[in-house]
Image: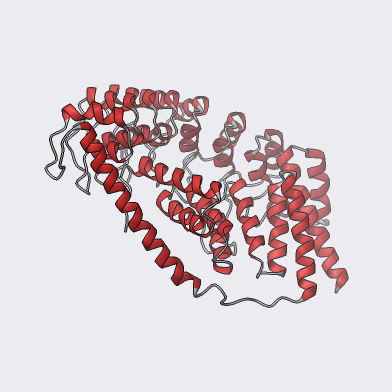
C-alpha cells in the first residue's frame, strides 16, 4: 500500500517536472521525462495524455510561455493536435471555464512569434474560448499590432464577436490606441456593441483613454448611445476627467440625458465630488426641479447628502445579511483523521515552498493534494484560489473562494479571495459586495478597504451606471 502511494507520488512529480520543462523550454529534459512516463507505449499518445488539473498539456504551457522550439517538437516530431483546447469539461470543477487552444494562450501572453508559428503550422485563429474570445481579441486587448495585422491580412474579420464584444471593444477597453487604429483601418465597425450595449467608445471612456476616444469619434462612433441607461458622458462624469468630458461635449454629447435612475451626468459628477466637472456641465445642463438650490455649490451639497444617505442604507443592509449568515458558521465541520491532517500539512508545506519560488502550477497541485486529504481546512482553499488567480484561471479561483467562505464565513481573507476573483472576471458589483463583507469582519484591514473602493469605482466605469443600493 505504502509502495503504491510512493509510486503514484513519483509519477505525479515527473508529470509536474514534464510540464515545467515545456514551460521553461528545456527540450532535452522534456524528451527524457516523456520517455520515462511513456514506459514503452506510444510516445505521442502518452505525451498528449499528460495534463494538469485544468486539462492543459505541454503544448498549452509551451505556447503560454513563448517556447516556440518546444511547440515545434511537440507538433512536428510527435504530431500532437494543434487546436486541442484545455479544460474540455472533464475536470472536477462544476463549470467548463476556458476551452483555450495553444494559439489563444500564446496570443494572450503577447508571444507573437509563437502565435505566428502556430498559425503557419495550421492552428485555426477562428476557434474561440468558451467566452467567445479568439486570438484576435487577445491581440487587440494587449495592443499586439503585429499579430493583429498578421491575422487581419489573412482575411479574418475585425468584427468577430465574443461575450465581451468585438476586438475593437477589447482594444478600446484596454486603452490600446494603436490597436484601435489598426482595426479601424481594416474595416472594424466603430459602433459594434455587446448584448449589454457596450460599444468601443463606451469602453474607451470607461478605460479613461482620451486617445482611443478621439480616434473613435473621428471614425464615426456615436457619442449619445447608452448601456444600462448610462451614456459615455455619465461615465466620464463619474471618472471626473475634464478631458473626456470636453471631448464628448465637443462631439455633440447631450448633458441632459438621464440614466435609468433619472440621474444626469452633472449629478454623477457632483455625487463623486468632482467640482471641475460640475462647473463644466453646469451651464449646459437644464435645472433639475428636485434640487433646492440650482448652483454649482448647491448641486454638490445636495448630491453629497444623497450619497451619504445611500451609504448608510447599504451599511444597515449588509449588517442584517451578515447576522443571518453567521447562523451557519458552525455547520458541516468535517472530521479528519490525524494522519490525514499530517500529510495535508506536508503537502501544504510543499505548496508554500513552490509558491515562494513562483511555481504556481506546482503550488496549485500541492494544495490540491492537501485539500484531498483535509477538505476542512479553509486556508488550503484560500491558497489554491490565489494560485488560480496567478495562473489566469479566475473562475476556478472563484469556486475555491466560495468554498473557503462556506467553511469559514467569519474569515475576512476568504471575502478578499472571492472579491479578487470576481474583480478579475470584471464582475465589479459582486466584487465590491465581497470586499465590503470582508471590511465588516475586519474594519482595520486597509487592503480590504482599498479593494472595496476600487471595485466600486471600477464597476461604475465599466458598466457606466451610478452606484445602486438594493
Coloured how? secondary structure
The vertical placement of 454 against 209, above or below, is: below
Look at the image and tell me whether residue 98 can be seen: no
How many numbered badges does the structure rendering display?
0
The quadrant in which the C terminus is found is: bottom left
| Quadrant of the image occupied by residue 292 | top left
- Left or right of 188: which side holds 222? left
Quadrant into which the N terminus falls: bottom right
Which residue lies at the image location 30% right of the left edge and 27% below the top edge? 276
Residue appearing at x 53%, y 57% in the figure: 415
Where's residue 277, x and y in %? 29, 29
Residue drawn at (34%, 44%) of the image:
463
Asked whether, in this view, residue 363 is left or right of residue 116, the answer is right
Comparing 103 with 325, the one in front is 325
Of the pair 234 and 30, the residue shown nearer to us = 234
Q: Where is residue 250 shown, x and y percent of the image?
A: 23, 22
Amino acid at each position: 500500500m505504502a509502495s503504491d502511494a510512493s509510486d503514484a507520488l513519483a509519477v505525479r512529480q515527473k508529470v509536474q517536472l514534464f510540464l515545467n520543462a515545456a514551460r521553461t523550454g528545456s527540450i532535452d529534459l522534456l524528451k527524457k521525462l516523456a520517455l520515462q512516463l511513456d514506459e514503452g507505449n506510444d510516445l505521442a499518445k502518452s505525451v498528449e495524455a499528460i495534463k494538469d488539473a485544468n486539462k492543459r498539456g505541454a503544448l498549452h504551457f509551451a505556447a503560454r510561455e513563448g517556447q516556440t522550439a518546444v511547440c515545434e517538437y511537440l507538433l512536428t516530431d510527435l504530431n500532437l493536435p494543434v487546436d486541442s483546447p484545455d479544460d474540455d469539461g472533464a475536470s472536477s470543477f462544476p463549470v467548463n471555464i476556458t476551452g483555450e487552444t495553444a494559439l489563444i494562450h500564446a496570443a494572450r501572453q503577447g508571444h507573437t512569434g509563437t502565435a505566428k508559428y502556430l498559425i503557419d503550422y495550421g492552428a485555426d485563429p477562428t476557434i474561440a474560448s468558451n467566452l467567445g474570445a479568439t486570438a484576435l481579441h487577445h491581440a487587440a486587448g494587449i495592443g499586439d499590432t503585429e499579430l493583429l495585422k498578421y491575422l487581419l491580412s489573412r482575411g479574418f474579420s475585425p468584427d468577430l464577436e465574443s461575450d465581451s464584444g468585438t476586438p475593437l471593444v477589447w482594444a478600446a477597453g484596454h486603452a490600446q490606441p494603436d490597436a484601435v487604429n489598426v482595426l479601424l483601418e481594416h474595416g472594424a465597425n466603430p459602433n459594434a456593441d455587446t448584448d449589454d450595449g457596450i460599444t468601443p467608445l463606451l469602453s474607451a471612456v470607461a478605460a479613461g483613454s482620451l486617445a482611443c476616444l478621439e480616434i473613435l469619434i473621428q471614425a464615426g462612433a456615436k457619442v449619445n448611445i447608452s448601456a444600462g441607461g448610462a451614456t459615455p458622458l455619465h461615465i466620464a462624469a463619474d471618472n471626473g476627467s475634464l478631458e473626456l468630458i470636453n471631448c464628448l461635449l465637443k462631439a455633440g454629447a447631450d448633458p441632459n440625458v438621464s440614466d435609468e435612475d433619472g440621474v444626469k451626468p452633472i449629478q454623477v459628477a457632483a455625487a463623486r465630488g468632482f467640482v471641475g466637472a460640475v462647473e463644466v456641465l453646469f451651464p449646459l445642463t437644464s435645472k433639475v426641479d428636485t434640487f433646492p438650490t440650482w448652483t454649482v455649490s448647491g448641486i454638490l451639497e445636495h448630491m453629497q447628502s444623497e450619497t451619504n444617505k445611500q451609504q448608510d442604507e447599504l451599511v444597515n443592509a449588509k449588517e442584517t445579511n451578515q447576522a443571518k449568515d453567521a447562523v451557519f458558521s458552525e455547520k458541516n465541520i468535517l472530521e479528519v483523521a490525524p494522519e490525514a491532517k499530517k500529510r495535508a500539512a506536508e503537502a501544504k508545506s510543499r505548496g508554500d515552498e513552490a509558491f515562494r519560488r513562483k511555481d504556481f502550477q506546482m503550488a496549485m497541485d500541492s494544495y490540491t493534494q492537501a485539500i484531498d486529504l483535509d477538505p476542512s481546512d479553509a486556508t488550503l482553499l484560500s491558497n489554491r484560489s490565489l494560485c488560480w488567480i496567478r495562473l489566469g484561471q479566475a473562475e476556478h479561483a472563484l469556486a475555491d473562494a466560495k468554498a473557503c467562505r462556506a467553511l469559514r464565513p467569519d474569515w475576512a481573507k476568504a471575502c478578499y479571495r472571492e472579491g479578487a476573483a470576481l474583480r478579475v472576471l470584471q464582475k465589479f458589483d459582486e466584487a465590491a459586495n465581497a470586499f465590503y463583507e470582508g471590511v465588516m469582519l475586519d474594519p482595520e484591514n486597509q487592503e480590504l478597504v482599498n479593494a472595496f473602493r476600487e471595485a466600486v469605482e471600477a464597476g461604475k466605469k465599466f458598466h457606466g451606471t451610478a452606484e445602486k443600493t438594493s
